[in-house]
Image (cartoon, rainbow, N blue to C red):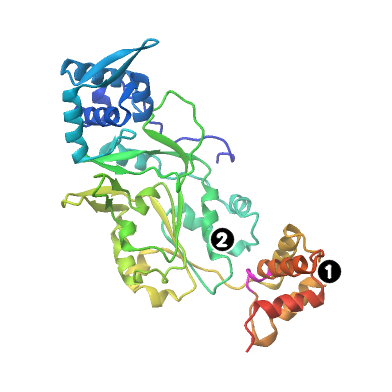
Amino acid sequence: MPLLGEEQWLFTPPVPRDLEGLGLSSGLVTDLVLRRLSVESTSTIQSLSSFLKLPVTIVHTVFTNLRQQQLVEVKGMVGNDYRISLSVSGHAVAAERLRVSQYAGAAPVSLKDYCKAVKMQATEVEINRGTLRAAFSDLVIPDSLLDQLGPALIERSSIFLYGPPGNGKSSLAERLLRVFQDSVFIPYAVEVDGRIISLYDPAMHQRMADDSEDRDPRWVPCRRPCIIVGGELTMGLLDLRHDDTTGVYSAPLQMKANNGLFVIDDFGRQQVSPRELLNRWIVPLDRRVDYLSLNYGLKFEIPFQVLVVFATNLKPTELADEAFLRRIHNKIRIDAVSTEAFDEIFRRVARSRKVTMAPESSEDLRRLVLAGGRSELHACYPADVCNILNSIASYEGRAATASPADLKRAVDLYFTME
């Protein structure tokens, strides 16, 4: 298993040497150059290469063809590079191409090359109790739970985390990616039937520094993605979204999560009904493929190399029928924590929040939490109470302490009193 920070690649996209090696039509590449020149007014071969993520040799080939058609003009030289702009006829052609699509960014990769790369970058990792314990070292997790998570991660199937609220389902789900310490390449965009699907999303993908010139610049080196959604999830986010103004498609969330994790937090509380959402996932979870459609009806297939994690505090049988639950092989219940785990969580949180506690503080907090008819210790209680202790101390201009009096004040503020 690779060490954290050590770069590991299952796939490295080779540098295309010519137009044919791009896997795209020469017309599409020419359109990109024309649209980019229209945006920049005047540019250079090197600048176009850098912005469109195309090798200089390929941009030079397109430039030569456009020059022969009198669609571009040479305005001078910048060192050994041409300074070029569109001719009058070139502006007319570019305007026509802009009406079809306004995309003038990084050149896409073909759907075929994208599908091949996703399959080649499927997760490969050795997992045992020790590696899981290291990945979740900042959480207090019993070995019994690690022993359920391990086989589930090795299978790379979906995981259903359920149980009462406040016991770390969300924290656990978002840390699962720590097990996979290698990296993947994600394309800026994918081309399907001449249409552009924007895929790389800096808001969702963690880019890595990589100065290598021995790879196709159309691909972005990233950590394996981990996309987390909650109540804001709608069916529209799971389908291609077409921008009528630009003519560009946005990739759905599961496509952005390929080769990584897709966490659906608070499952059952989305704007879309659980039945609709689960029906959308039945085929992808079962066959590891998904089907998307362009706005004029063309349907195509993409790989579904995604570890989907459902996290909910609702009963699974209230959310899904037997047919769907059968497709989720790993259903793991996250229960209330033990006394020992609760005390350890309290000690860790108090230390990190700079809350001074006495040896008996853990017992005091447990006693106060279980008063008033409550019967379970939840993992979230120590952090929430410590936050209130800090607020009390700040209000009174003193250091935070887990004294019996302050714990009583914090617990009374925290819990609803009958």
Percent x, y of residue 207: 48, 39
Q: Secondary structure at mark 1?
A: loop
Q: Is residue 309 visible?
A: yes
Residue 152's place in the image compared with 305, above or below, is below
Percent x, y of residue 52: 34, 29
Q: Give the spatial CA distance, label 1 vs label 2.
A: 27 Å
Residue 381 magenta: yes
Give the prevailing secondary structure in the magenta stretch: loop
Residue 359 bears which disc, if any? 1
Give residue 118's quadrant in the image.
Answer: top left
Residue positioned 40% across, 50% down in the render: 257
In screen coordinates, is 207 left or right of 134? left
Name the quarter where the N terminus is drawn. Answer: top right
Give residue 284's quadrant in the image.
Answer: bottom left
In screen coordinates, is 166 left or right of 115? right
Percent x, y of residue 218: 36, 32
Find the magenta span and give its range. Answer: 378-382
Q: Secondary structure at mark 2?
A: helix
Residue 183's place in the image compared with 319, above or below, is above
The residue at which mark 2 appears reads as 171
The residue nearer to you, when weighing 105 against 262, is 105
